[in-house]
Amino acid sequence: MSGTDSTCAYVLDPDAPETWGGEQGEECLVDQKWSCPHKADEDREHCIFHRSVDKKDDVEVVKALLNRIESTASNPHKGKSQFLAAEFGEFGLGEAARTGSQSHLSGADTDIALSYAKFCESADFGDMTFGGDVSFSGVEFEQEVSFQSVEFGGEADFRNVMFGGDASFGSFRFIESEAANFGGNASFQGAEFVGEVDFGGAKFEGNASFLKTEFNQEASFSGAKFESQVTFGDLTGRADFGQEAFFGGAVFNAHAEFRNVNFGAYTGFRSAEFNQKASFRNAGFGKKVDFSDAEFEQETNFSGVELTEAYFLRVNFEGNIDFSNAVFNQKTNFSQTDFNQKAIFTRAEFTQGVDFTAQTLVDGRFDGADLTHATFTDAILRGANFENAILSRATLFNADLRGARLSGTILGDVRVDEGTRFLGSQSNNKIGGSRSARETLRKLRKKRYCVYDHNYEGENGDKDIDSAKSVYRALEELGGRHARPRLQARSFVRRQDLQQKQYWDSASDADNPLEWIINVAKGSRAKVAQVTLLYGESPWRVIGYSLGIILSFAFLYPLVGGIKPKGGKPVTYARIAANPLKILTSLYYSTLTYTALGFGDFQPVGVGRLLTTVETGLGAVMLALLVFILGRRAAR
């Protein structure tokens, strides 16, 4: 038995888990063996704090704890504010304050240690102010606990706490303290909340850590304010939300780290404000997540996240946003969302589609992404990267993809209309406002190219003939499927132009004469097809050349006296000078000859016979080509 002046016999040994309520193999948060400094009661072995709950009065225990802390503030003695592994029954600091005990625990040296304490019944710390550091590490709360309106001036340590009942931290506040080594920092690392937890309206002015924290029931951080960095997950560990998590209206004024966090049920970030960088990298959202009306002022990272049902309605992304390698298992809605900087969706997978209606995603990155069933109606996608992306069954009505990178993109049965634009410079905005007729005409005549074309005039052009040809071929097929003849024709012609260029480039780089001859022959043939027929795409060129041939021969026949009316004399320029209307006779004959309708009342004479033969042959060829071109265009 201990006497009145003797100390408590309790000893906490880090190597003996039974002394601190742990189990073999667990790590103790106390660095060295600790002996209780408090006096034991008369004829008792342990102090009032380490006696079993059924052998002491709960109110007396609370009063004794407050007296020890207050006496430490007036007469500093570190051991007097240490209550490691203490046992408490009904615990109410708020109630003690209302009955006359001091509720403001201030003083630079008033550091309170309650590590591995056990609260067997409900605990209430409401309205308290802790001036120094306080440790609740390893504490077990068997029933509900309240920290409503509590203020912590120093570091608060809640590592590995077990919350067996509901926990309330409403209006919780960590205030900065010059006396604390890590002023205002709060750690819930390894804590377990068995019941509901409420941090609604809590204010964290120091760093806050929830690494390896388990939230088994509903967790609410609605309206919470984080002035310094808050960490729910990183490479060393993560928080686990087993049920609903609410962050609606929360304000993050410093870096918010949710990396690898597991959200098992509904998660709400509606109207949350992220004023510094935010990271949800590799986080998992098992059910619905709602970021509607949230504000992201700086760079945000969602790379590798897995989302089941996600809503990003009216979200404002002021900084870069990274969704690379993200998996969206249900249709995702980005309606009315503002992407003010680069949006990265590289290799993202949208298994049920995604809605980007009316979004501005200039220079966005979708390379390698699965965008099957995606909706980009009225979206501005100038300069976006869709290389190797899957756009099967995507909707691109009235979408602007000028300057977009489409090499290797699977367009499949993508839906487009007359308002969908693929070719042209991304800086070539819609024509609007007051423009001169000359400028308007110049724009109408200006040719449009894909971003890989060597003639592309926009910024960030990637000069690659093979990529350009593949894009033009894909757009040619797309235009054919969707009754876009101008897109189909323009893409076909430009692909042929690039093929011709490759022939000439190959000829200039030829290593032997035979290779040079072959490429020159191919290039010459392609050049002729371009000049005369525009590769079979321009009936107007055939008509123009036909008119030119008819007129040319009409002026050649009088030069050689090659035609002679029956019973008359040959038509020459001498007779035309006397009667200018006779030139119409030559024009009439040339037309009949070109169209192979016969000579009429004329007959060729002399060199005229040769000219007639040549014109007839040219006419037959050109008319056949015209029929071919018209038939091809009609088939489209």
Image (cartoon, rainbow, N blue to C red):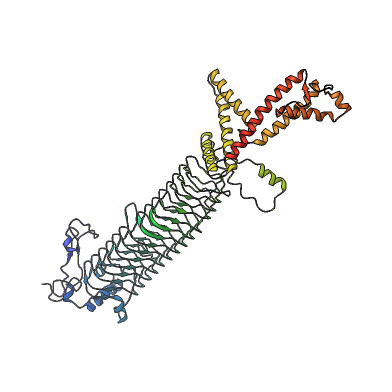
Q: Is residue 338 left or right of residue 566?
A: left
Q: Is residue 404 left or right of residue 549?
A: left
Q: Is residue 221 left or right of residue 392?
A: left
Identify the residue at horizontal 43%, vertical 51% (top origin): 323
Identify the residue at horizontal 38%, vertical 68% (top origin): 202
Q: Position of residue 326 (x, y in %)?
A: 40, 50
The answer to whether residue 144 is seen in the rendering is: yes
Identify the residue at horizontal 27%, vertical 64% (top origin): 161
Q: Position of residue 508 (x, y in %)?
A: 57, 24
513 up-or-down from 537: above or below: above
520 up-or-down from 5: above or below: above
Of 390 and 162, the residue lying toward us = 390
Residue 619 location, quadrant? top right
Residue 10 location, quadrant? bottom left
Q: Is residue 62 left or right of residue 127?
A: left
Residue 50 location, quadrant? bottom left
Residue extending furthest toward the right? 578
The answer to whether residue 456 is seen in the rendering is: no
Of 53 and 257, the residue lying toward us = 257
580 up-or-down from 405: above or below: above
Of 380 and 131, the residue lying toward us = 380
Total labels drawn:
0
Q: Position of residue 222 (x, y in %)?
A: 40, 67
